[in-house]
Amino acid sequence: MHQKTIKKETSFEGVGLHTGKNCKVTLRPANIDTGIIFFRTDRGNMIKLSPFAVVDTSFATTIGYNGTRVKTVEHLMSVLSAFEIDNLFIDVEGPEIPALDGSATEISKIVLQAGISIQSAPKKVIEIIQPISFEEGKTKITGIPFNGRKFSQTIEFKNHFLGKQQISIELSADSFMQDIAPARTFGFLKDVEMLRQHGLGRGGSLDNAVIISDDGIVNPSGTRFPDEFVRHKALDCIGDMYLCGFQILGHIISERSGHTANVKFLKKLLGSRDCFRAYSLSSETASPQYIAPNFLEQQVN
Ligand SMILES: [Zn+2]
């Protein structure tokens, strides 16, 4: 198993879901051991990906450093996790990653069109070796050992068009493209006004979100899956877990989670050294090469 980047530079642009601003993203190949680095090109500032770079988790995952922010990184991160991209420069012109159609399908196609390049260095991973849980109110996220990458998600809403939905997926590029990537962002009609008052959801429309009212799905085209909502929650969770920049080998079981709980769980996992080990997946050596993940030494903003 080797590290990966993309073969050639590629770009996409569109409106940000929350800021409503037009933003352009350029993905550029990066050398081995670079990790994932965001540049706000309109500000001249860099944000190195890490769970400690997360500065806001209300309705989207926002990373930042020294006052410069990039909002709504989770769908792009989900795609990078599914395709196991380890090294990448992400230039962002504007405050937010474009929403496109509210799912991860378009970003996936853009990355696949750029091509995935296998690099000469072994991939670094985090393996969960002891069960670990984060619990807050009705939210619970548990990580348990598993030989692969597995995500289970449960949502439970009072709205009877959503109700209780569950999904379990072993993550691969194929399973992601088929079962997770097409699932769109969703929200409740009754929350739209509240979001706008908080300066959020300004770019939201029926073209990039599924809107649910008490009477049903507002979008004339309906849903892409009957359980599109839990699939999108899994998409978000996959993206948030990749904020550490390492693939996590294990089974992540999330109940009623959101970005805030995802990031808290991830930080708890990384702070629990007896629950995981980090190593290089070198096929040339019989035993794993253990490493000290550098994000543990990174400063909290
Ligand atoms: Zn999302």
Image (cartoon, grey):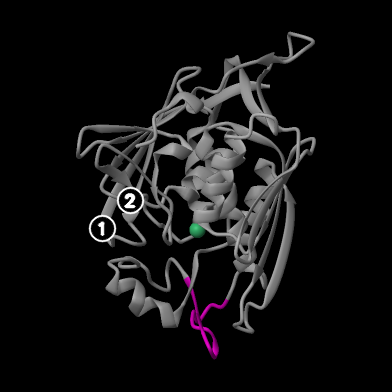
Image location (x, y in percent) of residue 254: 66, 56
**Quarter assignment of residue 195:** bottom left
Q: Is residue 131 above or below residue 197?
A: above
Between residues 67 and 4, which one lies in front from this camera angle? 67
Answer above or below: position of 300 versus 63. above
Answer with left or right where residue 16 lies relative to residue 289. Answer: left
Q: Which residue is mark 2?
A: 96
Tag 1 residue? 21
Residue at 58 percent across and 51 percent down: it is 237
- Numbered label attached to residue 6: none
Residue farthest toward the top in the current orientation of the protein: 285
- Taking the magenta stretch, the answer to whether it contains residue 153 is no
Judging depth in this view, the residue of 226 and 275 nearest the camera is 275
Circle 1 crowding by C-alpha within 10 Å: few under 14, some 14–19, many from 20: some
Q: Quadrant of the C terminus?
A: top left
Q: Are marks 1 and 2 in contact (CB under 8 Å)?
A: yes
Pointer 2 residue Cβ closer than 8 Å to ligand 1: no
Amino acid of disc 2? Glu
Q: Position of residue 6 (x, y in %)?
A: 49, 29
What is the x, y in percent for residue 1?
68, 22
Over which residues does the magenta segment extend?
210-222
Q: Residue at x 67, y 69 (%)?
A: 227
